[in-house]
Image: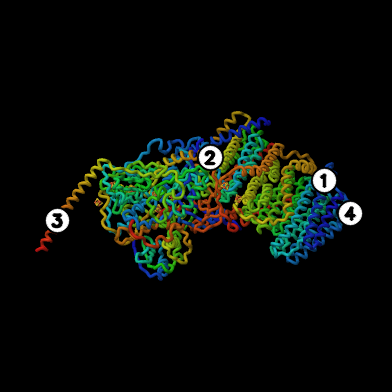
């Protein structure tokens, strides 16, 4: 049992440098892993919509028609789920947090032109492939039909 | 002189007349007219006495012709026997034998003294000086006002208390009889006469306490009786000793002997004993609390304004004899202690009348202590305290009584929100309460003077009692005052059932308090200082400096202006009204909140009473024992030393 | 003198998970010390200039938030701290979460984060404080006043 | 005597930054009765199992409470892992233990600070929270978040903590230990502080058991029980003694918490030295089917996670019984007869976390 | 002291007291923050705070509050005027409790549980420190033979020499009067109190500003009384007094940072014990000296 | 750690609980679950040291469930919660909030199982 235990610390604090950071007068220091906000490298995104599906708060919208990727930072809980799940590693976690604001903004990103082209090319290729497959299928069907017709004729 | 006789006999007659009138309306009218006449006579007498005799010689003493004295003495003796018989009959009826013994012990020796002519004769039986005049003012005006108040009060009282037999004509009669006795008491200079009136007041108090005839009332009345009779016995011993050993028969002569005279200590301590029982000092304080069962007018008149003052009046009369002897020490210690202990006890009370009772005891303690110092300055303070207390306290009693009739409760807690529910009453009470403890009102000024006097007389204990006691006093008055000022929005107003006459009386008293506060320097220098100079045989200087008085008058004016200022402010400001804070769960207004189970509950916070610290259970008995021990020891030492 | 130099803060937890609460509290402690900007954490709506709400609201806290807001003297600013307070966060689909604070009272500044970072909160306060000054200017022209008491007291209290 | 009054204490009240509400029945300053109401921050997150699949529920579980967020995420994962018979890699177990104990430290230091604040010792509060920041820094370095970590997942950890970082932690922990010395001394030895803690809220060992208390609240009354001894995560491999106190009052509870900070420091040291290398997660296949109840020792005491699933993506029922919930009956009991000035102290004595209590 | 002198010093008081009070509060804020290892607000923070309060909307719980708080401010200032005009110290304390009563009534009038509790506790605090303040006045009287400040400052030796116990006792009470830990029971600046803000709970906006202003005047007055112990004829003593007051205030701040808040029982009994022992003891010795001196 | 689960009929709840109490167990938790096939099951967990003992019964929710708060005093909290969230009547609780413990937006939100999926 003793009294006035804290006197020494209080006096010492008085004459030593305070533990307070200089923020906001100096930039804040974030750790390497700090989960601040979600970034999308629109060069890589393929608009697959996986992130939209996985996001537990529904903060991401992927619009395939308009070819945009939208995030509502005022809904994002920085769970990093989308980042981990992105098949193209197009998403990453930025260290800086979203600035506070007077409105709950949402951020929309257009697909980068190169990616648009790539996607278009892919889509075209896919379409061609599909067309080819269709054609093949139809040819096959036709062949079958013909074969059947032949058979029935016989 | 004639006026004095008129006053005396008129009051006596009033008593007889009211006792005979059954019809309530008529009696009310008679009482009111009678009281007014009495008050006028009283004032006329005071003015007369002041402008004649007193102002020139400082004092008037009457040495009636011996035939008159003789007659009076026989009348008194007869009355005393009658009193004894009355007490005996009642005591037998209620099985309280010891009262008879005490009464007999108090009555017969004095009778014996008179019958055997051992008493000192050819005395000036009566004496009128400034102090008497002051007491006349108090007794006459406060008494008259209370008698008027009682008319309306009793009417309502019996409406609310159907179980109590209506004996209001007796009540009224006893009040007048009491006033007569009081007049006698304060004009008497002869010890035996004073004793006679003293016993009468004791008996009347006893009868009034027992007014309701309920078991509790009876018990309390007998407690008051035996304590006062015990005091009477003390008085008797003092008279005997004065007559037989000192050969003096009046207070003036006794005081003239001076504090150093041989054997003087014995009558002094016995008179003090009488005084402290009458003034309900510890250890005899309990009767006064019990006395609160009586209807309020009697509490106001007997048990705060006048009768209990008889004790301290006696002490003030003999205060020069206290200087530097054991009697003085005993009185100051008991008084100081009572002041402190009773104010502590008052903290734990929520019954308005009990708070008032404890406060009365406490303030009487202060007066007692002042008188016991035996210094002019202290006695000045005592007289001022007596005056202020009488007026403020009777106002408070009347107000509480009126509240009780209007709302059915006299509990301080039930005065919650009075400022909205019953604003007139709240203002009246505010003046009464502030008068009791706040600067710049009267009581505080007097207390201040007392403090100064204690310091100057090097009385360390008293100073300590006083500083602690005034802190506790502030607490219990303050929280009462606070309750009145709670603003309960949209509460229903109490129906104002208080009679016009009662209001008038309370307004008068309120006005008197204000007047006294304004005029106290004048009262102090014109009335009180001369008496003291004369009885102490030295000139008494100014007690409170002019500068301070000026400052206090300024404060008074400022306080007076506060309501005006407030009214102006409220008119010209447009504040946003919001709800009181209740942790965010007000139920839509600021009188209710949503409780734990989702229901709606009224919000109300009671005052603190701290039974565990200041409760009667905790400190009443210890302080009674302590003071009883102190009184006993000091009396034994004093008497033993003197013999 | 500007009002912005002395923003006093009232914190209410409308239904947060504590994460944001402790960060609000942490911003008053030595490391972040918002008292540098004059912020005092008063517990009393009547002294507060800034209401910081954490967590989304439900029917039970709705009243409380409303009431605290109404007890604050103008000018006042509301900060919704944390994603829950902004739009209900991960709990917005819960049956007992109505959504963000803006479903009940007007929110001036949204501070995102789950949990909200003290730095973000400092930024939010700095923004809020500017609004205080603006609102003060606006207030000079009109004085609002409203009275709301229940019609009739139910019987006598006590 | 008409001096009983009911005072609404909370939900908005500065000594309760969390919205618990108490109806205090007062007699002067004495509390003669107290009725709690805890519905203010009920969200209904247990019902979210209908809307989030069993993997996503981890994020919800973490946000049951921001103070021991880690524990809740872990507890939920542990229950599901039991149902699915998943063997978690050893390294993940050790990481879980380390983070768990860091949570305990930060939670207890936070509590010490709040307690200091409740009895009006502002500088002590500030000092405790200054020290706590160092732990939060470690969290941020390891997981990227200061209070919500998002690092556990069913089947292990989402990220590894590199060994260099762990050895940095050891250094920070040494610093913290040094800083804590004076704080703990003031709490446990200062006469004035003791006068506010000793003899406040006394509950005998029998009473705490009957009231179903748990955690430091239980051990502060001399009952030796600590769910960590059940040996989940890596606790089996680590030596530690259960801290108890025979004071049975708020001082005892303070003592237990203060000593548990030091104990956590020792556990973290042991775990960091013993941690094996290897993977931190295993692949999870299929959906859970079955039921299980995990009991773990959160900073505030034993928490139970009951999971019932029937082989679908969405589990049937998640029920979390949190330590505060278990301690509330004891709180109501100790409040009866205390002083108003002790109410904050007694409320804090259970270290209330209303968020998880009401979920 | 003649009339002009008195008027001049009252004027100076009226103008300077808020400034001095704010300076002390700024000193308080900075030092407290540093003791807690924080950077803390600027020295001028109290000025900002006060200005802000006066710019806020006034919201009230009832119409009486404004008037009562105004009463508090007026009488507090008046109390100071008595003191600085060289008036009676005893009267200063009496007027002070009158002023306090207004504040308490304002709290009562709100009918909110926390205001009312604060009011009760304020009573308790007043009850705790009043004996000591009265003894302080008495101490001056014993030492200087007069209750008047004007006489006290014309002493040959400062009062502290003969009344050190009373001085210490008074400093002890300053902890209560300045609402510092361990005795900040009725209200507190940092509201981590079971009382929330107690006494000042339901004062808001500029009315709260008024109340703060009143408190500033009151605290300057109390510091002046503490300084009075050091003042004598010698002009240097004024400098000594200022330094002494700063030191006293520093110890008050230190106490604020190294003690938990106690309960009212402890406050009452410890304050009364200190009053009795230090105040009463000193007074007893002074009395004995006086008797011996005769 | 030992862990035991007993399925009991609803009527024998009080008897079983009484017996468990006599053996020196404490209450750990009470948990209600909505059963898809209809009705509810209520799981009582008791502990003694590190050991655990579970009782479970099924109720259709039509008639009130007996409170065990006379036997295990802290049960009132769990039972009130079950009453408010599941809408089950529970009789003879020592402290009955009558639905005021959780004042939820919708009454008895757990009473019905929602359709699965987001
Ligand atoms: S998951 Fe990745 S690739 Fe797919 S839409 Fe989202 S960001 Fe684009
Ligand atoms: S595997 Fe990925 S890309 Fe392929 S269909 Fe599934 S979600 Fe789409
Ligand atoms: S971090 Fe989480 S909340 Fe944010 S966008 Fe990604 S998945 Fe959604
Ligand atoms: S409602 Fe209006 S009139 Fe009634 S008390 Fe309140 S302010 Fe006064
Ligand atoms: S935003 Fe995140 S941390 Fe904050 S209250 Fe909501 S869930 Fe908790
Ligand atoms: S009652 Fe109406 S007009 Fe009057 S002050 Fe209130 S809002 Fe303004
Ligand atoms: S106990 Fe902790 S989490 Fe809860 S409100 Fe207080 S600081 Fe926040
Ligand atoms: S009580 Fe529960 S939610 Fe709160 S901190 Fe502890 S484990 Fe987390």
- Is label 3 or label 4 in front? 3
Residues at discs 1 and 3 both on one chain: no
Residues at discs 2 and 4 both on one chain: no
Q: Mark 2 points at which residue?
A: C141
Q: Mark 4 points at which residue?
A: B68
Q: Residues within 10 Å of mark 3 (few under 14, many from 20)?
A: few
Residues at discs 1 and 4 both on one chain: yes
- Is label 3 or label 2 in front? 3
Residue A113 visible? The answer is: yes
In the rendering, at what x and y percent does residue B432 appear? 69, 49
Q: Which residue lies furthest to the front in this view?
A: A153
Name the disc covering residue B47, or none: 1
Q: Residues within 10 Å of mark 1 (few under 14, many from 20)?
A: few
Q: Residue furthest top?
A: E235
Q: Mark 3 points at which residue?
A: A140
Q: Residue at x 52, y 36 (%)?
A: E47
């Amino acid at each position: 049992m003793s009294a006035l235990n804290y006197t020494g610390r209080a006096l010492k604090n008085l004459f030593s440098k305070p533990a307070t950071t200089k923020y906001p007068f100096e930039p804040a220091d974030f750790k390497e892993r700090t989960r601040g906000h979600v970034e999308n490298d629109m060069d890589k995104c393929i608009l697959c919509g996986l992130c939209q599906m996985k996001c537990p708060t529904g903060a991401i919208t992927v619009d395939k028609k308009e070819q945009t990727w939208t995030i509502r930072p005022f809904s994002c809980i920085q769970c990093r789920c989308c980042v981990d799940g992105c098949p193209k590693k197009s998403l990453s976690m930025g260290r800086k947090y979203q600035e506070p604001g007077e409105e709950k903004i949402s951020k929309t990103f257009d697909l980068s032109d190169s990616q648009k082209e790539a996607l278009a090319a892919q889509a075209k290729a896919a379409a061609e492939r599909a067309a080819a497959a269709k054609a093949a299928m139809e040819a096959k069907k036709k062949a079958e039909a013909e074969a059947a017709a032949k058979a029935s004729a016989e | 002189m004639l006026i004095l006789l008129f006053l005396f006999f008129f009051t006596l007659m009033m008593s007889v007349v009211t006792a005979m009138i059954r019809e309530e309306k008529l009696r009310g009218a008679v009482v009111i007219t009678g009281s007014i006449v009495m008050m006028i006579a009283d004032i006329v007498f005071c003015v007369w006495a002041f402008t004649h005799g007193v102002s020139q010689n400082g004092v008037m003493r009457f040495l009636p012709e011996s035939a008159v004295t003789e007659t009076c003495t026989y009348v008194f003796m007869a009355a005393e026997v009658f009193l004894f018989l009355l007490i005996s009959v009642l005591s037998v009826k209620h099985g309280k034998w010891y009262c008879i013994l005490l009464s007999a012990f108090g009555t017969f020796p004095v009778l014996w003294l008179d019958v055997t002519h051992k008493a000192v004769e050819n005395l000036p039986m009566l004496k009128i000086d400034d102090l008497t005049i002051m007491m006349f003012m108090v007794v006459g005006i406060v008494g008259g006002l209370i008698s008027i108040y009682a008319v309306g009060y009793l009417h309502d009282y019996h409406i609310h208390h159907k179980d109590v037999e209506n004996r209001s004509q007796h009540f009224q009669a006893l009040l007048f009889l009491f006033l007569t006795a009081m007049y006698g008491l304060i004009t008497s200079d002869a010890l035996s006469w004073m004793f006679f009136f003293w016993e009468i007041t004791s008996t009347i108090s006893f009868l009034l306490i027992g007014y309701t005839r309920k078991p509790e009332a009876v018990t309390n009345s007998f407690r008051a009786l035996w304590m006062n009779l015990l005091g009477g016995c003390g008085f008797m011993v003092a008279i005997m000793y004065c007559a037989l050993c000192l050969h003096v028969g009046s207070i003036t002569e006794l005081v003239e002997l001076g504090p150093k005279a041989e054997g003087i200590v014995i009558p002094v301590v016995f008179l003090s004993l009488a005084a402290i029982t009458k003034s309900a000092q510890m250890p005899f304080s309990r009767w006064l609390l019990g006395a609160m069962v009586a209807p309020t007018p009697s509490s106001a008149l007997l048990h705060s304004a006048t009768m209990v003052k008889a004790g301290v009046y006696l002490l003030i009369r003999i205060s020069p004899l206290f200087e530097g002897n054991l009697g003085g020490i005993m009185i100051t210690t008991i008084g100081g202690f009572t002041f402190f202990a009773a104010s502590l006890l008052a903290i734990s009370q929520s019954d308005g009348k009990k708070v008032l009772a404890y406060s009365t005891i406490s303030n009487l303690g202060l007066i007692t202590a002042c008188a016991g110092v035996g210094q002019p300055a202290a006695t000045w303070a005592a007289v001022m305290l007596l005056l202020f207390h009488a007026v403020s306290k009777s106002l408070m009693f009347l107000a509480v009584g009126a509240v009780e009739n209007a709302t059915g409760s006299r509990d301080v807690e039930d005065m919650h929100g009075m400022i909205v529910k019953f604003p007139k009453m709240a203002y009246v009470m505010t003046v009464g309460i502030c008068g009791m403890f706040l600067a710049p009102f009267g009581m505080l000024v007097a207390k201040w003077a007392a403090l100064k006097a204690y310091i100057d007389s090097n009385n360390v204990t008293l100073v300590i009692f006083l500083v602690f006691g005034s802190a506790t006093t502030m607490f219990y008055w303050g929280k009462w005052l606070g309750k009145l000022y709670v603003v309960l929005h949209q509460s229903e107003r109490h129906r104002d059932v208080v009679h016009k006459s009662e209001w008038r009386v309370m307004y008068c008293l309120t006005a008197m308090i204000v007047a006294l506060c304004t005029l106290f320097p004048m009262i102090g220098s014109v009335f009180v200082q001369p008496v003291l100079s004369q009885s102490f045989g030295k000139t008494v200087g100014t007690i409170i400096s002019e500068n301070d008085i000026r400052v206090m008058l300024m404060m008074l004016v400022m306080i007076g202006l506060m309501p005006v200022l407030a009214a102006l402010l409220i008119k010209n400001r447009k504040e946003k009204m919001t709800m009181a804070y209740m942790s965010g769960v007000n139920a839509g207004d600021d009188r209710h909140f949503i409780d734990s189970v989702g229901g709606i509950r009224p919000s109300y916070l009671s005052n603190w009473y701290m039974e565990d610290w200041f409760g009667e259970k905790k400190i009443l008995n210890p302080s009674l024992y302590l003071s009883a021990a102190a009184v006993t020891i000091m009396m034994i030492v004093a008497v033993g030393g003197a013999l | 003198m500007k009002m912005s130099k002395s923003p006093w803060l009232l914190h209410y937890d409308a239904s947060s998970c504590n994460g944001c609460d402790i960060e609000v509290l942490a911003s008053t402690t030595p490391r972040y010390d918002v008292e540098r900007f004059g912020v005092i954490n008063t517990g009393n709506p009547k002294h507060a200039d800034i209401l910081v709400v954490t967590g989304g609201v439900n029917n039970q806290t709705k009243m409380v938030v409303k009431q605290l807001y109404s007890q604050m003297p103008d000018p006042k600013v509301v900060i919704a701290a944390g994603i829950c307070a902004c739009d209900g966060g991960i709990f917005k689909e819960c049956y007992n979460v109505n959504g963000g604070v803006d479903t009940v009272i007007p929110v001036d500044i949204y501070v995102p984060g789950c949990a909200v970072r003290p730095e973000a909160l400092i930024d939010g306060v700095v923004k809020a404080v500017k609004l205080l000054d603006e609102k003060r200017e606006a207030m000079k022209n009109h004085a609002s006043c409203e009275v709301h008491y229940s019609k009739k007291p139910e019987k006598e209290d006590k | 005597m008409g001096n009983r009054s009911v005072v609404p204490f909370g939900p908005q009240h500065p000594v309760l930054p969390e919205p618990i509400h108490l109806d205090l029945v007062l007699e002067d300053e004495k509390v003669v009765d107290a009725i709690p109401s805890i519905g203010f921050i009920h969200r209904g997150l247990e019902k979210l199992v209908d809307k989030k699949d069993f993997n996503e529920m981890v994020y919800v579980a973490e946000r049951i409470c921001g103070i021991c967020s880690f524990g809740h995420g872990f507890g939920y994962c542990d229950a599901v892992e039991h149902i699915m018979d998943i063997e978690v890699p050893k390294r993940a177990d050790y990481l879980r233990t380390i983070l768990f104990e860091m949570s305990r430290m930060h939670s207890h230091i936070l509590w010490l600070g709040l307690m200091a604040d409740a009895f009006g010792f502002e500088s002590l509060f500030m000092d405790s929270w200054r020290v706590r920041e160092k732990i939060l820094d470690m969290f941020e370095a390891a997981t990227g978040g200061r209070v919500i970590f998002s690092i556990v997942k069913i089947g292990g950890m989402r990220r590894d903590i590199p060994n260099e970082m762990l050895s940095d932690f050891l250094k920070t922990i040494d610093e913290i230990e040094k800083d804590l010395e004076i704080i703990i001394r003031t709490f446990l030895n200062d006469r004035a502080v003791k006068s506010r803690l000793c003899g406040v809220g006394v509950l005998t060992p029998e009473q705490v058991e009957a009231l179903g208390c748990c955690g430091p609240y239980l051990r502060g009354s001399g009952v030796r029980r600590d769910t960590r001894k059940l040996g989940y995560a890596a606790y089996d491999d680590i030596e530690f003694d259960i801290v108890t106190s025979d004071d049975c009052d708020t001082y005892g509870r303070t003592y237990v918490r203060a000593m548990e900070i030091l104990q956590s420091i020792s556990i973290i040291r042991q775990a960091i030295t013993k941690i094996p290398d290897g993977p931190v997660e295993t692949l999870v296949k299929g959906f859970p089917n079955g039921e299980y109840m995990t009991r773990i020792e959160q900073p505030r005491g034993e928490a139970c996670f009951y999971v019932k699933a029937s082989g679908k993506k969405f589990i049937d029922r998640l029920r979390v019984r949190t330590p505060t919930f278990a301690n509330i009956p004891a709180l109501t009991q100790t409040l009866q007869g205390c002083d108003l000035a002790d109410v904050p102290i007694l409320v804090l004595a259970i270290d209330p976390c209303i968020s998880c209590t009401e979920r | 002291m003649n009339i002009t002198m008195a008027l001049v010093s009252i004027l100076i008081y009226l103008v300077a007291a808020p400034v001095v009070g704010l300076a002390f509060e700024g000193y308080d804020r900075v030092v407290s923050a540093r003791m807690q290892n924080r950077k803390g607000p600027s020295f001028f923070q109290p000025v900002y705070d006060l200005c802000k309060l006066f710019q806020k909307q006034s919201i009230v719980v009832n119409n009486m509050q404004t008037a009562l708080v105004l009463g508090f401010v007026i009488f507090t200032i008046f109390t100071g005027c008595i003191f600085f005009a060289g008036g009676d110290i005893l009267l200063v304390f009496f007027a002070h409790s009158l002023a306090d009563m207004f504040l308490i009534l304002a709290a009562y009038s709100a009918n909110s549980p926390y205001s009312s509790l604060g009011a009760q506790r304020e009573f308790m605090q007043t009850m705790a420190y009043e004996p000591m303040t009265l003894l302080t006045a008495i101490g001056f009287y014993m030492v200087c033979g007069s209750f008047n400040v004007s006489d006290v400052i014309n002493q040959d030796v400062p009062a502290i020499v003969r009344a050190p116990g009373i001085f210490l006792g008074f400093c002890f009470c300053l902890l209560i009067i300045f609402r510092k830990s361990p005795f900040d029971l009725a209200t507190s600046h940092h509201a981590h109190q079971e009382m929330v803000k107690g006494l000042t709970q339901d004062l808001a906006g500029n009315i709260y500003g008024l109340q703060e202003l009143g408190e500033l005047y009151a605290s300057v007055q109390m510091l002046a009384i503490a300084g009075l112990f050091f003042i004598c004829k010698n002009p240097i003593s004024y400098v000594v007094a200022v330094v002494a007051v700063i030191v006293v205030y520093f110890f008050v701040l230190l106490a604020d940072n190294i003690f938990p808040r106690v309960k009212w029982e402890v406050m009452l009994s410890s304050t009364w014990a200190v009053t009795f022992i230090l105040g009463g003891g000193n007074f007893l010795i002074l009395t004995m000296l006086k008797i011996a001196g005769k | 750690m030992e862990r035991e689960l007993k399925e009991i009929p609803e009527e024998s709840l009080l008897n079983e609980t009484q017996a468990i109490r006599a053996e020196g167990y404490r209450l750990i938790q009470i948990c209600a679950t909505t059963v898809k096939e209809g009705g509810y099951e209520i799981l009582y967990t008791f502990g003694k040291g590190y050991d655990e003992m579970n009782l479970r019964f099924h109720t259709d929710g039509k008639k009130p469930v007996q409170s065990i708060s006379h036997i295990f005093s802290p049960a009132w909290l769990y039972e009130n919660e079950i009453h408010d969230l599941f809408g089950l009547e529970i009789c003879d609780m020592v402290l009955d909030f009558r639905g005021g413990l959780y004042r939820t937006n919708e009454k008895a939100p757990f009473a019905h199982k929602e359709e699965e999926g987001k």
